[in-house]
Image (cartoon, grey):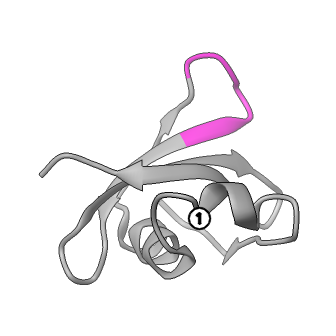
């Protein structure tokens, strides 16, 4: 999966980082080898990946013209 940027602003940062840090979200996105479309929202993807330290993370993100805008994330299953 090619992602040019991870987009943050005051609207998505607080919600997306409730359960995992922004750094973990970004690492999971950069380390991802793929993503699948969200089943209810066609403009969103589900990224299941790991951080640099091997922590499994699931990220729901909105697809933008430049990259991904994280919406929410949580620790995944190993």
Q: Is residue 44 left or right of residue 27?
A: right
Crowding near the residue tagged with mark 1, few <14, some 14–19, many ≥20 C-alpha atoms within 10 Å: some
Q: Residue at x 47, y 59 (%)?
A: 1
Q: In the rendered image, is residue 56 in sight? A: yes
Q: In the rendered image, is residue 69 in sight? A: no
Percent x, y for residue 38? 57, 28
Percent x, y for residue 56? 25, 59
Q: Residue at x 60, y 49 (%)?
A: 72
Task: Give the answer, above or below, for where 59 lies relative to 68.
Answer: above
Q: Is residue 66 left or right of residue 45?
A: right
Secondary structure that dominates the magenta span? loop
Question: Which is nearer the eye, 28 or 63?
Answer: 28
Task: Give the answer, above or below, for where 22 lies relative to 11.
Answer: below
The quadrant where residue 69 appears: bottom right
Q: Residue at x 87, y 69 (%)?
A: 10
Kindly identify which residue carries mark 1: 17
Question: Which is nearer the eye, 46 or 76?
Answer: 76
Q: What is the tally of numbered marks visible in this picture?
A: 1
What are the residue bounds of the magenta stretch? 39-45
Q: Residue at x 70, y 24 (%)?
A: 41
Task: Give the answer, above or below, for where 22 lies relative to 42.
Answer: below
Percent x, y for residue 40? 64, 16
Q: Is residue 55 left or right of residue 12?
A: left
Percent x, y for residue 23? 50, 82
Give the farthest residue toward the top. 40
């Amino acid at each position: 999966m090619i992602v040019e940027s991870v987009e943050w602003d005051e609207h998505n940062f607080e919600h997306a980082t409730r359960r995992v840090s922004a750094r973990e979200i970004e690492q999971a996105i950069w380390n991802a080898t793929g993503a699948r479309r969200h089943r209810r929202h066609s403009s969103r993807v589900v990224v299941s990946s790991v951080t640099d330290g091997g922590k499994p993370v699931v990220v729901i993100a909105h697809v933008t013209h430049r990259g991904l805008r994280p919406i929410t994330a949580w620790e995944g299953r190993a």
